Image (cartoon, helix red, strand yellow):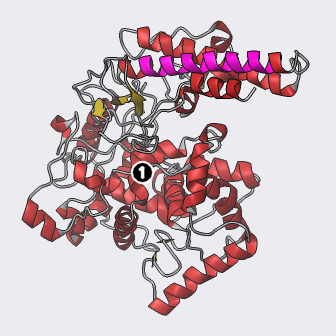
């Protein structure tokens, strides 16, 4: 193939993407500093985003609006899946709905006086903008607090098993988990250097043009230097991003952050090698940027609001030591953000169960021991973990969902709930002398029992597998129903771990596991 002619170093003069990239990093730093990105958003925040913010945005789309911090983070991650975002708002408001953009982008407000607004003309102008958004919200939703009410948030989490967690079939909460470490990847010292960012903009232009100059369909993988500009371009204005893509490459380039298994010869590794080869063929240069590649997974202190990637800290502490199972990829791998391709992806669980003394594919430890404190609030929920012990003599703590032990614990808990559900049905039947046997309440209890029995069979089947992939022995009526089957396993047989596993098992992430027997004993004592 003939190398592409010399490319301009800048493009899209209507938007200064170098400056916007700095605003983008400042936005992420602000959310991190206030702890917004350090834990999965609550279901209350998700409800506030889908049921309040999006309709609010649709009604006042011509206004400059600055969302509260919890909503700003969800909105940020949703827009990073632009096809999904557009599909959602058009399903919600109609097929002709214009793109609901962030205006201004990379902005949030934490309370009535604190906010992050890039290029704010003055403190007075900034406060006026914050107040305007809050006043419009109060006018639209007089009974809904603009800022997240922590008391309501706690109450909401106690009811989480009754709430839908997908947004138009998109796992937005899962996306926030994946995006939470992006700041770490773009916090090396090079990302504060203007010449490095200018080079990144030129490389991003080449990245967009690369699709038209590959000999076969591949999934192209950016470096983190490029990925910063890709994210920034999308988040600045989705409609503008689509227009630019069509001008530069004749089509849109969708963004996807779900391919993150860096196992050697895995789908991401294979895609990155193909991208390197295509880049070399097109541009005659190596696809590697010092300071702009994969940095490993964040060290533990990254997950503290006090963490800050400042130049002084780097000089004092040296390079922050990364962790994770993919240390071999540091400095020579690209981002996990790709455009969806036709490569088959591996299960996020990897190809083998994680040993209890090992590290899971997502870089987290397989087992985290429980603290010495007791009480239901002492050991909070942890995403990707199941709390408990495998047997009476086992260690109490958090077991990663890629361990076999996690499924043994879940199966036992569901068995307890099945026993309790049967007791409640028997109790209700006995107390009513059978009169409510056909009532709505009884039907619902029986349906809940059937669901628990299905889940118990699935969990036991998973725990019995030699590897966390492959054939899963689903109940026949689940296997034959595409809707039910898709809740547990993908069309190509890869396991899923939906959030209702936690809720159905009960007590996951709590220091005390209360058996259903306690409940039934209490009921009998009041009869």
Magenta span: helix, strand or loop, mainly? Answer: helix
Residue shown at 48%/42% (left/top)?
174
Which residues are drawn in magenta?
407-429
> Can you give x and y, in whole percent of width and height, for residue 130 in the image?
55, 80
Left or right: residue 152 compared with residue 177: right
Q: Which residue is mark 1?
A: 39
Residue 172 higher or lower than 437, as above or below: below
Location of residue 488 by image quarter: top right
Residue 192 higher or lower than 4, as above or below: below
Q: Secondary structure at mark 1?
A: loop
| Count of labels in the image | 1
> Can you give x and y, in whole percent of width and height, for residue 265 in the image?
27, 25
Instruction: Specify whether residue 206 is in view.
Output: no
* Front residue of 160 and 12: 160
Q: Quadrant of the N terminus?
A: top left
Residue shown at 66%/60% (left/top)?
54
Location of residue 204 by image quarter: bottom left
């Amino acid at each position: 193939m003939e190398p592409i002619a010399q490319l301009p170093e800048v493009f899209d003069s209507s938007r200064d993407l170098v400056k916007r990239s700095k605003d983008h990093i400042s936005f992420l730093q602000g959310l991190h500093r206030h702890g917004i990105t350090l834990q999965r958003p609550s279901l209350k925040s998700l409800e506030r985003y889908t049921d309040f913010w999006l309709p609010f945005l649709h009604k006042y789309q011509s206004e400059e609006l600055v969302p509260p911090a919890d909503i700003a983070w969800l909105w940020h991650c949703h827009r990073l899946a632009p096809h999904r975002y557009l599909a959602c708002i058009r399903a919600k408001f109609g097929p002709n709905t214009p793109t609901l953009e962030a205006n201004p982008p990379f902005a949030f407000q934490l309370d009535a006086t604190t906010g992050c607004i890039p290029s704010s003309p003055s403190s007075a102008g900034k406060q006026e903008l914050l107040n305007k958004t809050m006043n419009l919200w109060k006018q639209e939703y007089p009974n809904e607090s603009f800022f997240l009410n922590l008391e309501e948030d706690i109450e909401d989490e106690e009811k989480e098993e009754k709430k839908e967690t997908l947004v138009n079939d998109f796992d937005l909460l899962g996306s926030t988990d994946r995006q939470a470490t992006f700041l770490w990847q773009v916090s090396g010292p090079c990302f504060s250097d203007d010449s490095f960012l200018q080079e990144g903009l030129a490389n991003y232009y080449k990245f967009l043009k690369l699709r038209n100059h590959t000999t076969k369909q591949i999934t192209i993988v950016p470096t983190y230097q490029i990925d910063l500009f890709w994210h920034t371009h999308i988040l600045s204005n989705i409609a503008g991003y689509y227009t630019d893509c069509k001008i530069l490459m004749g089509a849109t380039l969708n963004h996807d952050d779900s391919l993150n298994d860096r196992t050697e010869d895995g789908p991401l590794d294979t895609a990155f090698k193909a991208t390197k080869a295509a880049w070399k063929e097109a541009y005659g240069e190596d696809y590697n940027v010092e300071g702009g590649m994969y940095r490993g997974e964040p060290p533990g202190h990254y997950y503290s609001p006090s963490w800050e990637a400042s130049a002084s800290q780097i000089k004092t502490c040296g390079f922050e030591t990364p962790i994770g199972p993919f240390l071999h990829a540091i400095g020579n791998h690209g981002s996990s953000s790709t455009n969806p391709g036709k490569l088959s992806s591996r299960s996020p669980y990897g190809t083998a169960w994680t040993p209890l003394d090992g590290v899971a594919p997502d870089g987290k430890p397989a087992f985290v021991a429980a603290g010495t404190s007791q009480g239901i609030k002492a050991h909070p929920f942890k995403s990707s973990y199941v709390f408990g012990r495998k047997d009476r003599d086992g260690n109490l703590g958090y077991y990663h969902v890629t361990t076999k032990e996690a499924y043994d614990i879940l199966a036992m808990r569901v068995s307890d709930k099945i026993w309790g559900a049967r007791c409640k049905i028997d109790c209700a039947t006995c107390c009513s002398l059978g009169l409510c046997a056909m009532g709505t309440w009884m039907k619902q209890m029986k349906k809940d029992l059937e669901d628990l029995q299905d889940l118990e069979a699935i969990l036991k089947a998973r725990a019995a597998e030699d590897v966390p992939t492959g054939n899963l022995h689903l109940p026949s009526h689940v296997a034959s129903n595409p809707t039910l089957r898709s809740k547990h396993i993908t069309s190509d047989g890869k396991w899923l771990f939906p959030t209702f596993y936690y809720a159905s098992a009960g007590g996951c992430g709590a220091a005390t596991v209360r058996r259903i027997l306690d409940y039934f004993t209490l009921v009998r004592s009041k009869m």
